[in-house]
Amino acid sequence: MTRQLTLISALALAPTVAPAFAAEAIRVGEETPLLEKGPGGAVQHAPHVAFGGGVYLAVWQEGWHGEGGRARIYAARVTPEGRVLDGRGIEVAPAPTGVQENPRVAFAGGVFLVVWQDLRSGKDADVLAARISPQGNVLDAKPIPIAAGPGTQALPDVAGDGRDFLVVWQSFDREAAAYEGLAVRVSPEGVPGEVVVTGAAPRPRIAWGEDAYLAVYGDGRVTSVKLDRDGRPINPSKCGHEVMRNVRQPLPSVVGVPGKGWLVVVHRSMPDYWGWGGPGGMRCYLVTPEGDLDASMEPHLKTDRAGNWDRLPHWLDAAGRGAATWPWGPSACAFDGRHAVAVWPRHHLAKKVMLTDADLLCARVEGWSPVDREGVAVAASEAEEQMPALASDAAGGLLSVYEKHRPDGGVLIAGRTLRTR
Amino acid sequence: MKQVLPAWLFLGALALWGSGPVPARGQPEPDRPPEMIPDASAPRWRVDRFAGNSTAGPVLVQGPAREAGGMTRCAVAPAPDGSVFLATGGKWAHDRIVRVAPDGQLRLVAGGGSSLADVPAPRAKILVATRGNSLVYSAPDESLYFVHTMIPAVRRLFKKESAWFVETAAGDPNRAGQADGPAREALFTEPMSIAVTSTGTIYVLDGGKLLRKIEGGRVSTIAEFSGGPNPVDGPLEQATMAITDMSGHITVGEDDHTLYVADHWHFAARKIDLEKGTVTTVVGVPRDHPHFNTHADGPALSQASFNSGCAYVKWDPVHQALWCGGPDEHRFRWLKAGEVRTVIGKRGNRRWPVDALGLPADEVSVAWCNVAAVDVRGGVYLVSASHHGVWRAYEKEHEKKEGDR
């Protein structure tokens, strides 16, 4: 924790940002490990977090998920002030065999729904779910089977529309030898509805807007599709609407922004020796309530596609020629009641192209343009911090959870509160 | 890297400058033989998707190997028991190692941690070079060895009881240098490629010009090559090499005393006879040859060539052939009986069923590809920068029942 930990952003506002935001700042709280001495032996990965019922619920995989491992999904409630309420963690779905991976969580209808992929069969992954109350009680003694048929069912995501949940995932169709995107609505009582085809695969991410969900997904490009409450594509002609092309391992994040649509955050290229891929960047895209890219972005998108080396107005972060740092990797975003807020990793570069020692930064976003142009450090120690997740109480309070790598090679999930007003 | 890059550029530019006029593609000289000459065995080869799926996406998904995600251009190390280890995850460095068991199940065995010390595999920071022979299986001690230029050490992954561990086999992961001696006291500069003999002796190409040996717990320097625009054969101390860290580099050949080297910017495959202490060019033509800097098949030293340099070599002990190629080829070729021939793939066929099984080899078309490994049954592991995944090619005569896996 020797590197600077900026608590208040130095605002260098873009001309497009309203002056009213200039006096505001993001305040970052103290770092708190969620479970220091868990059964996983300081091997914790893949955190996610949601807010509801007055608390945050953070989830992660506890323990080694590789060969011989016993990774289990754990959860802990965190107060809006950043205090961990479940000091020993909550084991979501005890199981005698297999590993559990990639948990995601959302809140709707008074409960949290946790989803994950589970290799308990020893053959292929299934998608399972369990509900947790804001009081920290697991409501399903046996996990809810979301997708447990033949073929790999993996990389689920979940969002809530206030009443119900929608779970999306990628499902392997062995006859077609290909993945497809599926979805199912789940009630707060834990009852799944009909499974429907979304087209959103691979690695779907989903967020509720005002009257629909938006799923973003893809490999090599980022694509979006609007889904109704049951997960059906709303406008088939706009299925597979391209947000951005030529993105290596895109790993986008998405959040609904009332009145404006959805914010999608995705990195630009990896560094390369020759500069063929252009600059590094962490970029914002605004998808309108109709499911289109916001038209006012178009001039910048053309410049972006052309490989322009200057930072563009929709970029949260940038790396040019000879840069010492490079933004790249999975991001997270949430809506604080006024703005979207994004958290993203910024790596230090070694030998020109090697990404090392990631820090995490955050910024508020107005429309598709960052308010905090320089970014605010969320976690910037000499250790590696990565895989951020973010949730908000929609009243200016947020909790970011992330992987923090220790000198002994262990990885703990840590959290920090953010306050945007 | 700061010191190596200018050398690549210089040598590359020199190579192109010295190559003389090259006919435009598609307009061969009237008496010029075709660039692609199919090997007689080519019709017998088939290709299966081995790991990954084109629709799986960029995130690692464990389970059946052919349903796995996150399979970027892998380094591959088959083990005698039928397991195949893959390093995967990155563009410039792979950060995890997975194992595909003989039953086709893929599991993570190392990666996700951040330690360069001797630790259990879940805590280890894994860095494996993405384009070279950077991950090898050593049968005598049932271990994997791996390198990356970022880490000046040779590291070892092994199983003890039921858990995997990573330790430093030679060098110091936190200190670069050039020093021979006891393995843990020796220093490496930028180990970029690794090869292991049947008796467990390890050869390391270090920094593009040092050939190091790890044997009996000690590190020694076998050769220090000088550079220069032309490949000079002869005694080790006089031979020249022009190697980049983006190539396949070294492989053990037909016996434990033979190494082959992808001499990138000399556009040549070279053979090192460790008993005689000599270097010999086995594939490549002079810079003033009309085929220089193309990817022509034919007699190895009078017609065969590599486009953009020789990027990889891999010895095939079953077929007694040397797989070799340039960095941007669309097919897989081998050197056998003094001739370079195309065995798998052909140019121009960009659309092919990438997830298929039993595909005739001449329907395969991948870009920026290389042979990553050969297993004891003669299965050849193919990887590419243009597609996620690993393919396994095999000659039907060698394997009647492949595809049943």
Image (cartoon, coloured by chain):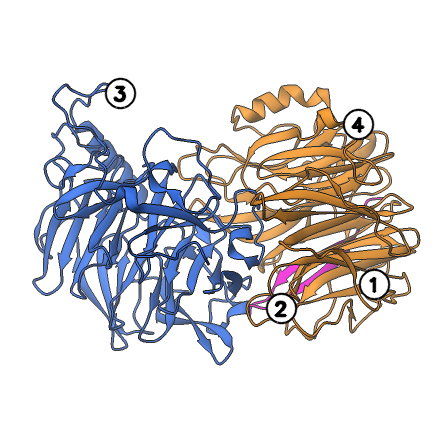
Q: Residue furthest bottom?
A: B161
Read off the residue under disc 4.
Answer: A18
- Cα–Cα span, label 4 and label 1: 36 Å
Residue sitting nearer the eye, B332 or A331 = B332
Dots 4, 1 in contact, CB < 8 A: no
Q: Is residue B86 magenta?
A: no
- Cα–Cα span, label 4 and label 2: 44 Å
Query: Which chain letter goes with mark 3?
Result: B
Read off the residue under disc 1.
Answer: A77
Q: Is residue A410 magenta?
A: yes
Q: Which mark is residue A43?
A: 2
- Cα–Cα span, label 3 and label 1: 66 Å
Amino acid on which the number 1 mark rests in the picture: Arg
Q: Quadrant of the N terminus of chain A?
A: bottom right
Where is residue B178 shown, x and y percent of the image? 27, 63
- Cα–Cα span, label 4 and label 3: 58 Å
Question: Which quarter of the picture shows residue B285?
Answer: top left
Residue A296: in sight, yes or no?
A: yes
Find numbered disc 2 in the image and state the secondary structure of the residue it sits on: loop
Query: Which chain letter goes with mark 4?
Result: A
Magenta segment: A400-421
- Cα–Cα span, label 2 and label 3: 56 Å
Residue ID at (87%, 43%):
A161
